[in-house]
Amino acid sequence: MTAQSFSSLGPCIEACATDGSRLVVTTFGGQVLGWNTPDGRERLFVSATATTAGGQAIRGGVPVCWPQFSGQGPLPKHGLLRNRDWSVLTNDIDGDGRARVALRCEADAVTRAQWPHAFAATLVATVGGDTLELALTVRNTDAAPFSFTTALHGYWRVAELADVSLHGLEGHAFRDFTGTAGEAAGAPSAAALRFGPETDRVYADAPQPLTLDTGHGRLAFLQAGFTDTVVWNPGAERAAAIGDLEVDGWRRFVCVEAARIAVPVTLAPGAAWTGTQTVRALD
Ligand SMILES: O=P(O)(O)OC[C@H]1O[C@@H](O)[C@H](O)[C@@H](O)[C@@H]1O
């Protein structure tokens, strides 16, 4: 497979670990766009028609949703950071030969106009071996407490959606956000999760690890600080209304998102919170 070009999606950083695994990150949205394991396989999906035109968020990779998940609050969908310019803090190789990129985004006039609080958000992405590690840290740099919900909204590449299964959520209750009636209680199933029509679920206090059988290798997901997991795929019908998703693109990804939604995080002045998601390619 020819490596996808991200040149139209803002200034990109390409970082290579000593074992050949590779990370591509853009400062627009502080978004990881590419993750290659040492075998050269790309594990993330970015829509071929993704664009930042008009300040729109990039469709794919790992968008950072903060301080509001989805439309669950008064702010723009998925919050304020996925279309802000982040700055590069570090781009280096750690003591284990892993490539590490750290990006930061702080409150500015645009975020203050929508949400009055001062904050500093840092995303550290590290690749090496079979693993991608993502750590989101938020510090309250204000004089008053604030609360937030959040998610790392990863679009994990799959070969063909109809063949994909997600394991580890069997028997677990969820909130279902499909349909037009808003949120509903979803019935737990004893079977692994399969995909077809739209899937839009929030599993509170989610079990782990989860394993996604992508059809070109299994991915195992672990998380800490993030208590909840979101599973999303738009299905054919909703995908048709998503302007920046390539034709049939919905068949090429599943979002498995490390999230904190059911019980928001509240930070006192000066306090910080960190959530991590670790994704390991099992084969
Ligand atoms: O199209 P957007 O704004 O990137 O959001 C995509 C999806 O993101 C998911 O996390 C939500 O659960 C869905 O409800 C939402 O549709």
Image (tube, helix red, strand yellow):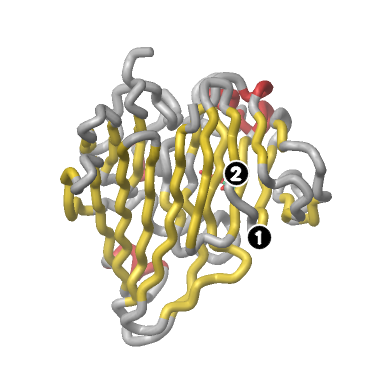
Please tell me whether mark 2 sits on a helix, a strand or a loop: strand
The quarter of the image holding the N terminus is: top left
Q: Which residue sits furthest bottom?
A: 143
Q: Is residue 108 above or below residue 2?
A: below
Instruction: Locate residue 208, reporting x and y percent.
Output: 60, 51
For the point 59% across and 35% down, the residue is 212
Q: Nearer the viewer, residue 251 or 280?
A: 280
Residue 252 placement, left or right of 237: left
Asked whether mark 1 lies closer than 8 Å to ligand 1, one says: no
For the point 28% across and 59% down, the residue is 105
C-alpha gap between disc 1 and disc 2? 14 Å
For the point 30% across and 52% down, the residue is 124
Upstream in sequence: badge 1 or badge 2: 1
Q: Is residue 148 above or below residue 79?
A: below
Mark nearest the camera among 1 and 2 is: 2
Q: Nearer the viewer, residue 47 or 213?
A: 213
Q: Which residue sits furthest top?
A: 1
Q: Which residue sits furthest front?
A: 96
Residue holding disc 2? 210
Q: Residues within 10 Å of mark 2 (few under 14, many from 20)?
A: some
Q: Is residue 204 above or below residue 179?
A: below
Instruction: Locate residue 199, reporting x and y percent.
Output: 69, 39
Residue type at the position of mark 2: Leu
Q: Is the Cβ of the residue at disc 1 closer than 8 Å to that at disc 2?
A: no
Instruction: Locate residue 256, reporting x and y percent.
Output: 56, 43
Residue type at the position of mark 1: Ala
Residue holding disc 1? 204
Which numbered marker is on residue 158? none
Please tell me whether mark 1 sits on a helix, a strand or a loop: loop
Residue 26 placement, left or right of 238: left
Q: Residues within 10 Å of mark 1 (few under 14, many from 20)?
A: many
Instruction: Locate residue 133, reporting x and y percent.
Output: 38, 47
